[in-house]
Image (cartoon, rainbow, N blue to C red):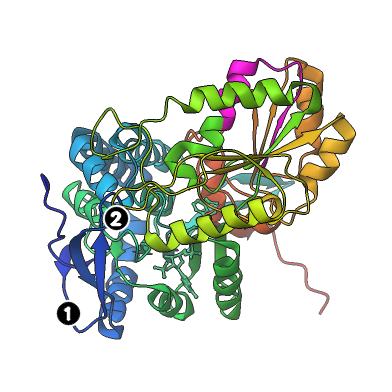
Amino acid sequence: MRYDTQPTASHFINGAYVEDSAGAPIDVIYPATGAVIGRVYAATPAIIEQALTSAKAAQADWAARSGTERGRVLRRAADLIRARNEALSVLETYDTGKPIQETSVADATSGADALEYFGGLAGSLTGEHIQLGQDWAYTRREPLGLCVGIGAWNYPTQIACWKAAPALACGNALVFKPSETTPLCALKIAEILVEAGLPPGVFNVVNGAGAVGGALVADPRVDKVTLTGSVPTGRKVYAAAAEGIRHVTMELGGKSPLIIFDDADLENAVGGAILGNFYSSGQICSNGTRVFVQRGIKEVFLARLTERLKGVVMGDPQDPEVNFGPMVSAAQREIVQGYIAKGAAEGARLVCGGAPEDRPGFFLPPTVFADVTDDMAIAREEIFGPVMAVLDFDDEAEVLARANATEFGLSAGVFTRDISRAHRMIAGLEAGTCFINSYNDAPVEMPFGGAKQSGVGRENAKAAIAHYSQLKSVYVRMGDVEAPY
Ligand code: NDP
């Protein structure tokens, strides 16, 4: 190991690392080898209490500062993250197994973008003035208060920052619980925020499994819950938040359609399908895993895809030449292998991949199924691994109806050279985040989130401000009050 992966302690609360080894031990496993590279302890009730108490206490003073001052801290943190991108990317690779080729450009950097963007916005958050004849009203944009963030394991640094940046910009405090599978990265973000000048307690990280998240969500002091996770977990967390009528943001799963018309630029369409299925070994919520290819170009599409997949370099994800890493855990690989077996059993044609690699770690090669039909499990359920399902279609109306025939609605993409058709299709697709002649771009300036069961609320962009603040309306009468008696 050329990097220290054991964190100083399991939790970061009130500006410092805190340990309580009475909690259940959680081994941190490097997905590329299966080796244990660290250990943390799940938060005990005492740790959860410390985290919530200190966040609650710190929030009012943070909110009382000017937006410019809050923004300065976030932008300083962004600079520190960028300056330490290399070390943070190495850590992200140990935490998740994603290749350093990816983590060095997509994780800490994306977190820094969010902190810089919302740091820039913080000073311009305002209410409005509404003239009402002689009288007038105004609105104050106020923070929600104490927020709880719960993250998935695929992008631990990015998820922590995508939640912290808008929450903190608006004057909230945030207690964040990473996935127990990837407990390392968020602790570093907490450390950096404090170094950048964030007052202790405004951003706390507690580690632990679902039960820790459950305890945080149910606490009456919590004003908002923001989750990135699966639909089943979303359902539970949403219901628990509803008990206290708390605000929610739900970033959940998907089974998104990527529609390739026969007039599309083939190289770009194949590139989009590769990015939208195999980046991060397919462990991306917005992936376009139902690839609808217009019948006439199906075989040429599959041939070119297979050819380009020969460029996959699997191996030690810390090696800069490697472009395809392992799955995050043995358990996740097992789930995905189960789907591969189902795909074959249900009659889909295996074009490539399918069998696990004979090497240590949780590797599974890019797997492509063709001749997939809408009723197959691999076309209906989120797999969250490197499995692409290619489906045939004939015309626009048919593919639109089939693309929408799902309870999910996270993302959708269209490849075509016909611009009218592209926009017509996007208007008809039931998805929150869409792409034309591209796939999976997620700049911080663009709102990100899901429709239907894929989510509630939006992350990133100005849209996120509405989900981390509330308006107070104030009516101001300038004349006398006329009461009937
Ligand atoms: P899970 O839904 O299993 O877990 C998400 C988080 O919720 C974890 O930290 C988990 O803890 C926690 N959790 C589980 N149960 C509860 C509970 N009852 N109360 C509170 N918290 C709980 O998702 P995964 O981690 O397996 O991530 C994969 C899923 O995330 C996929 O469905 C993917 O689509 C989705 N996702 C969505 C994104 C989006 O922006 N829309 C982005 C990335 C992923 P623990 O696991 O530690 O037990």
Asked where in the image residue 208 lies, by quadrant, the reply is bottom left
Is 472 on the left-hand or right-hand side of 404?
Answer: left
Is 32 on the left-hand or right-hand side of 195?
Answer: right
- The amino acid beneath tag 2 is Ala
Q: Is residue 214 above or below residue 71?
A: below
For the C terminus, give its image quadrant.
bottom right
- What distance separates the C-alpha of mark 1 from that of mark 2? 19 Å
| Front: mark 1 or 2 | 1
Residue 423 at x, y percent in the picture: 77, 26
Residue at 75% x, 45% y: name it: 430
Which residue, given by chain and number where applicable, does mark 2 sit on?
186
In front: 48, or 222? 48
* Residue extent of the magenta highlight: 257-273
Which residue, given by chain and number where applicable, does mark 1 sit on?
21
Is-magenta flag for residue 189? no
Residue at 37% x, 36% y: name it: 106
In front: 332, or 450? 332
In front: 471, or 230? 230
- The amino acid beneath tag 1 is Ser
Within 10 Å of the Cα at label 2, are there few (<14), some (14-19), or many (20+) other Cα atoms? many
Residue at 82% x, 44% y: name it: 402
Asked where in the image residue 237 lies, by quadrant, the reply is bottom right
Residue 455 at x, y percent in the picture: 62, 56
Identify the disc placed on residue 482.
Answer: none
- Determine if residue 14 is in view: no
- Determine if residue 198 is in view: yes
Is 17 on the left-hand or right-hand side of 229?
Answer: left
Residue labelled 2 has its Cβ within 8 Å of some atom of ligand 1: no
Is-magenta flag for residue 267? yes
